[in-house]
Image (cartoon, coloured by chain):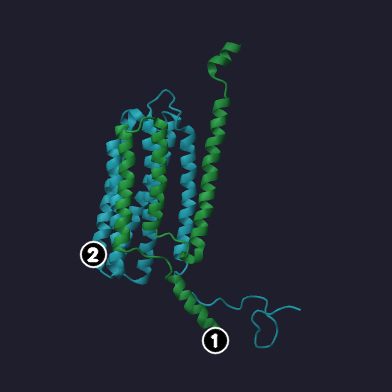
Chain colours: A cyan, B green
């Protein structure tokens, strides 16, 4: 004997879930975005593994000790940390429905992010100018791929941030914009988590090596 | 029947709101912790305060792990109940994958490197 889940009017058994109850729009977005972040995490894991394997192959080229300026990395790290807390403030003011303050904190976050990218690009330009290009050694290839991928993520986050600021300006803090800001919040803090790995394993352990 | 669907609905609404939000104090606590957890490893490496490089390396890796946990809790609002525990499941799965990929790659390649015959020995054999 079969068990009907949801008998129809005619009394015949129906072998499927008749209809899912309606979900509010975007109810699964945060879980879906979280799963995207986890898959992004796997990309970075592979790049970290590559760097871990190739990080010592200097091919008689420059070593981390010759290239990295820890003062600059410390400044860069603080830029990203500050942008994390200012994004947190943007989320807090968003919950209080204060549009102007949310926009202000988002703008400050964007400036810190821009400073981070600026400093990173300056560092890259300096290294390339000294001949430490990605083609120079396996260590440098792995370095530029890992740190460059992170920088690319932050750049995309900045574009996303500006897009959302325009959205909030046009439509206000509507439900959809709150959801988008929450996704960007997860993205932004996730990039900060990846940066912890970068400054520890690439820069600090590299100089220590 | 109708009460049943209503119950599901009510549950769903709650579900949509179930991701945790931070407060000013949790954000600030997370920020202060992460500043301290960043500053100490930088200081350790830049000043060379610890006697051996191995100890310094282990200590700064430990600081990194602690800081990642701090960020997860205070900035990403990770907890076991958000999204009915599915966020945590995805996170645990990812951590398992990351540990396998990282430790596996490093271990295998390290063995490969140490089993490779150095070039000067190879030329000596000819």
Q: Quadrant of residue A159?
A: bottom left
Q: Is any atom of residue A144 visible in this view?
A: no
Q: Quadrant of residue A103?
A: bottom left
Residue named by callout 2:
A101
Q: Nearer the viewer, residue A4 or A208?
A: A208
Q: Is any atom of residue B16 visible in this view?
A: yes
Residue named by callout 1:
B2
The answer to whether B48 is drawn above or below residue A117 in the figure is above
The mark found on residue B97 in the picture is none
**1 and 2 marks in contact (CB < 8 Å):** no
Q: Nearer the viewer, residue A198 or A157?
A: A198
Question: Left or right of A190: which side holds B105?
Answer: right
Quadrant holding the N terminus of chain B? bottom right
Q: Position of residue A83 (x, y in %)?
A: 29, 53
Q: Residue at x 28, y 51 (%)?
A: A82
Chain containing the residue with disc 2: A
The answer to whether A199 is drawn above or below residue A157 in the figure is above
Q: Residue at x 58, y 77 (%)?
A: A19
């Amino acid at each position: 004997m079969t068990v009907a889940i949801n008998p129809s009017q005619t009394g015949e058994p129906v072998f499927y879930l008749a209809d899912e109850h309606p979900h509010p729009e975007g109810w699964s977005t945060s879980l879906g975005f979280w799963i995207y972040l986890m898959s992004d995490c796997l990309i970075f894991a592979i790049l970290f593994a590559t760097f871990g394997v190739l990080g010592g192959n200097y091919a008689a080229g420059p070593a981390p000790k010759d290239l990295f300026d820890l003062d600059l990395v410390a400044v860069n790290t603080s830029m990203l940390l500050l942008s994390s807390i200012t994004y947190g403030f943007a989320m807090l003011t968003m919950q209080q429905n204060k549009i102007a303050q949310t926009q202000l904190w988002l703008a400050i976050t964007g400036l810190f992010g821009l400073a981070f990218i600026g400093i990173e690009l300056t560092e890259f330009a300096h290294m390339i100018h000294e001949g430490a290009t990605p083609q120079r050694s396996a260590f440098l290839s792995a370095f530029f791929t890992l740190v460059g991928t992170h920088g690319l993520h932050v750049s995309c986050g900045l574009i996303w941030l500006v897009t959302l600021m325009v959205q909030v300006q046009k439509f206000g803090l509507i439900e959809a914009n709150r959801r988008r800001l929450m996704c960007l919040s997860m993205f932004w803090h996730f990039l900060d988590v990846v940066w912890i790995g970068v400054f520890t394993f690439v820069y600090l352990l590299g100089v220590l090596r | 029947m109708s009460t049943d669907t209503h119950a599901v609905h009510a549950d769903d609404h709650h579900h949509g709101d179930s991701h945790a939000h931070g407060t000013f104090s949790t954000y600030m606590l997370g920020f202060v912790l992460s500043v301290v957890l960043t500053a100490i490893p930088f200081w350790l490496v830049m000043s060379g305060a610890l006697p051996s490089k191995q100890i310094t390396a282990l200590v700064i890796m430990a600081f990194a792990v602690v800081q990642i946990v701090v960020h997860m809790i205070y900035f990403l609002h990770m907890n076991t109940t958000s999204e009915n525990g599915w966020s945590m499941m995805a996170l645990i799965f990812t951590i398992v994958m990351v540990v396998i990929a990282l430790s596996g790659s490093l271990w295998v390649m390290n063995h490969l490197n140490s089993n490779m015959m150095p070039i000067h020995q190879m030329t000596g054999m000819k």
